[in-house]
Amino acid sequence: MDENNLEQPTVVTTMDETDKKCPECGGVMNFDPATGGLLCAYCGHKEEIASPGKAFELDLFSAAHTENRDWGVEKKKVSCHSCGAELIYDVLQVSEVCPYCGSNQVMEAADVDTLAPGGVVPFKIALKEAGEKFKAWIRRKLFCPRAAKKSATPESFKGVYLPYWTFDAFTASAYSARYGRDRIVRVGRDKTRVVTDWYSTSGTFDYFFNDELVRGTRRYDTKVMEKIEPFETEENKVYQPEYLAGFVSERYSVGIREGWEEAKTSITAQLRTLIDREIRVRHHADKVAGLRVSTNYSGLTYKYLMLPLWLSSFKYKEKIFQFMVNGQTGEVGGKAPVSALRVIIAVILGLAILTGLFFLLKDAQ
C-alpha cells in the first residue's frame, strides 16, 4: 500500500470517447480482452484505452464521505424476477436473458444510488478461450449426463464483472500460548510412549495484509467461487467506463462495512495460523495449545474493484446449474449434474473387475 496513493476517487465524466461509437463506421465498440482496448465488431477498428494507472487506496474510516457514484456513462438497473439478480447496464444496452439463471423475466427497475467502482481488473480471457477451457473441463466429468454436456455450450457464456472489496491493514498482535515438545520414553522392556513437555510463551507479531479480498455479492456457491479464485488484483486499472463496454456489471449486495467485518474474520484466522507457525519455529515445538491473540489495526484502506467472470447457466431436469470461468486467469469452476445410471454402471464394472481379480489370484495360489 502506498500512503501517497490515498486520494478521493476520481470522478469520471461522460465524454465523447466513452459512448463506444466507432469513428470509422459508427458501430458499437466493445472491450477486447485480446488487445486490452476497444474493438469495433463491424469494421475491426481498434482503439487503446488511456489508463491513468491503478485504483486508489481509500481511507476506510472516511468511506461514507468518499463514495463516488458517477459511472462515467449513464447506467440503469435491471432486475431478474426469477432469481432476484440486480445488474448494472449501459442505459442503451438491451438485455433479454439473465446471465445467472437463464430466465427471460428481466425488467428495468427504478434507478438507485449505486456506488461506482474505483478500479477494474480487465478481461484477459476472451469468449472463445473461455469456451475451450470449459469444454476441456466438462469432458473430464465422467458422471455428467451427455444431455447436460450438450446443453452447457461455450456459446452460452456471458461476460460479467463481479463486485469485490479489497482491504489493506497493518496488524500488531500480542499473543500468549503454550507450546509442547515431544520426547519418547521407554515403558517396560520393549515398549515406548510419547511424552509432551509443556512451556508457556508470549510475544508480539506484526504483519501487513495487502488486498484482502471480499466478495461484494452472495449470489454464488462459495466452494465454486474458491475454485476460480484468486484474482491478481495488483493488475487492476483505475475505473474507466470503456473497460466495461459490452459486459454486464453486478450491483454489490455486501456493503463496505459488512465487507470489512468479513475481511477481519479472515485476517484473524490467518494471524492465528501465522503465529502458531512462528511459535513452532522459534521454540522448535511440536504442538501449540491455548493460543490467545489480541490484534490492533492501523492504516486501514479499501478499494472497490470489478473483477471479470465468464458465466453460463443451464437447466437440467428442472434444476439450474452454473459454470464459471475466471476472466483473468482462465480457472474453471462449477457443479455438474451427476447421472445416477452412470454411477451404477461404474460401480457394477468396478465390482466385476475386483471379482475377476479375486478369482485370478485365487487360482494362482
Image (cartoon, rainbow, N blue to C red):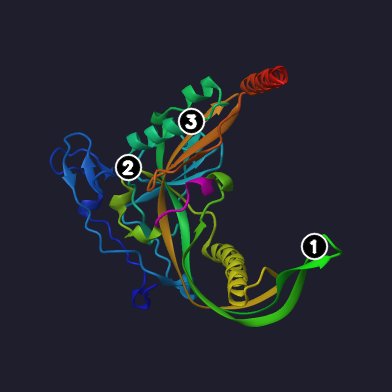
How far across and how far down the image is residue 292, in percent? 69, 75
Q: Residue at x 82, y 60 (%)?
A: 191
Q: What residue range appears in magenta?
A: 225-232
Q: What residue is shown at x 54% (from left), y 44% (from top)? A: 224
| Local SS, label 2 | loop
Pick the residue in front: 262 or 62: 262
Tell whether 278 sits left or right of 209.
right
Cβ–Cβ below 8 Å for labels 1 and 3?
no
Within 10 Å of the Cα at label 1, are there few (<14), some (14-19), or many (20+) other Cα atoms? few
Residue 246's tag is 2
Q: Which mark is residue 138?
A: 3
Callout in the foreground (1, 3): 1
Residue occupied by mark 1: 192
Do the residues bearing badges 1 and 2 touch, measured as CB atoms within 8 Å?
A: no
Q: Nearer the viewer, residue 355 or 69?
A: 355
For the residues labelled 1 and 3, the Cα–Cα distance comes to 52 Å
Disc 3 residue type?
Ile
Above or below: residue 244 compared with residue 5? above
- Left or right of 62 on screen, residue 234: left
Q: Amino acid at mark 2?
A: Gly
Q: Amino acid at mark 1?
A: Thr
